[in-house]
Image (tube, helix red, strand yellow):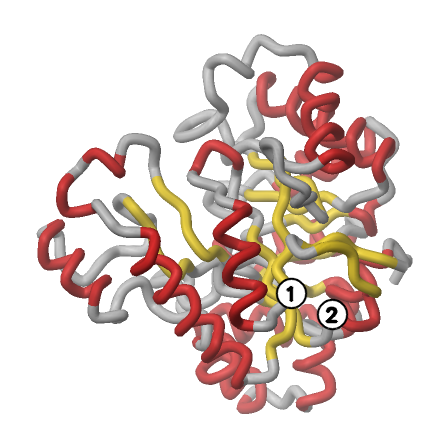
Amino acid sequence: MQVMTVLGSVDVSTLGRTLIHEHLFAKWPGAEFFPPMKITREWLLQQCYVRLGALKDQGVRTFVDPCPIELGRDVTLMAEVSRKVGMNIICTTGFYHEGPGLPYFWRPMTARQIADFYIGEIVNGVDGTDIRPGAIKCATSAEPTETEAKFLEAASIAHHETGVPLITHTTGGLGGPEQQAIFASHGVKPHRCLIGHCSDNPDPAYHQRVAEGGTYIGFDRLGFEYPSPETSADNVVRLVRNGYRPQVMLSTDRLCVFQGQMSRKPPTDDPYELKALMEQGKWPPPQTFLIDEFFPLLRERGLSDSEIFAMIEENPTRYFAGEPF
C-alpha cells in the first residue's frame, strides 16, 4: 500500500515514527503585511531544517502537515524541507473552519464543486506542481455549521473517489461526534477518519464517546496550557487501559514558524519581542516535546514503551494503509 508524500509515493511500511498533526509554517491572512511578522524564505527554511532535524534525531521519520489551504499552506516549502532533512512530509488538501477560515469565494460552492477541487489537487498536484496531498483536512467550529457540514460532505466525496483518509480539526475539543455523524451519513468508514484535537477536552466521557464511534482519536495538541500535560497523560492512559490504544494518535500541533497570534499564549504581547524570540529559535515551542517530555509522563503512569510508541508507529501506518483496527 502506497501513501503520497510531498516527494512522491512511498510504501506505508516505511513511514516509521510519525507525528500525525504538526506544521512547518502557517499564518493568519494579512500577517505578512505587519512589519514585525515579515520573514525571509531563507530564514524560514533554516528554522524548519533545525526543528525537523531535532525530530529526526529522536527517530521520527514522517511529519504530517495538515495546514489548511488558506492559512499559508506552502507545499514547495514542504518539499524543500523534506529533501534537505530526509524526512517524509505529508501535506493535505482542504480548508479551515468558518470563523478564521473558509474563504468567502468558496462558501457558496456546492459540495460537488468543492470535492472536484480537492480531487484535482490529489490527482494532479497542488497549484501547478506535481506535489500531491496524502490526506484531506476538514475543520468545524465547536458545533459544526451548515456551511462546514457541506465542506465535510465534499471531503467525503473526495475520499470515496481517491481513497485518501480524512483528518479533522475540532474547536475547543468539541464537535467530534458530530463530525463522525456527518462522515457516516456520507458513507465514510470510521477507521478512515482521524478526529483531531480531542486532547483539548479534558472530559474522559467525551474521549470515550469519540473512541466508541470507531474513528481514530487525536491527542494531537499536547503541551498546550490547557488541559495540562498531566491531565492529557491521564486521559491517554485511560483510553489505552480501556482497549482503545489502536485508535489513539499522538502529536503536538506545533509549528516551526507562525505568522500571527497563536492560540497558544506567547511569552510576550510585544510583536517585536516575539519576533526576536522567533529569530532565536525560542518560539514557537519545539515539537520534540512529545517524546522528550510527554512520553515520560505516560511511563510514570505505567505504560510500556511498546504501548507508547505503537501510537506513533503502528497506528499512523494502519491509518494511511486504510486497514481496520
> Does residue 6 lie above or below 82 as drawn?
above
Count neighbours of disc 2 (C-alpha within 10 A) and say few if under 14, some if 14 to 19, many if 20 or more.
many
Q: Is residue 251 visible?
A: yes
Residue 172, x across and y down, in percent: 46, 45
Q: Which residue position is annotated with label 1? A: 88
Instruction: Classify mark 2: helix, strand or loop.
Output: loop
Evaluate whether residue 202 shows in this view.
no
On the picture, is 284 further left or further right than 175?
A: left
Residue 15 tag number: 2
Residue at image location 83% in from the left, 65% down from the top: 11
Q: Examine the image and state in which quarter residue 203 appears.
A: bottom right
* Percent of width and height locating residue 221: 48, 60
**Residue 153 or residue 273, whichever sits in front:** 273
Q: Identify the residue shown where x is 26% and y is 56%.
A: 265
In the image, 276: left or right of 140?
left
Residue at mark 2 to residue at mark 1: CA–CA distance: 7 Å
Question: Which image quarter holds the C terminus?
Answer: bottom right
Q: Residue at x 44, y 76 (%)?
A: 289
* Nearer-N-terminus badge (2/1): 2
Which residue type carries mark 1?
Answer: Asn
Check whether the beta carbons of the residues at disc 2 and disc 1 lie within 8 A of each other.
yes
Q: Is residue 248 left or right of residue 292?
A: right
Could you classify mark 1 by the number of other residues whose Cα lies within 10 Å: few (under 14), some (14-19), or many (20 or more)? many
Q: Nearer the viewer, mark 2 or mark 1?
A: 1
The percent position of residue 95, horizontal first and vertical second, equals 55, 32
Quarter of the image with the N terminus in it: bottom right
Quick one: SS at disc 1?
A: strand
Judge by depth and name the residue closer to the eye, 255 or 205.
Answer: 255
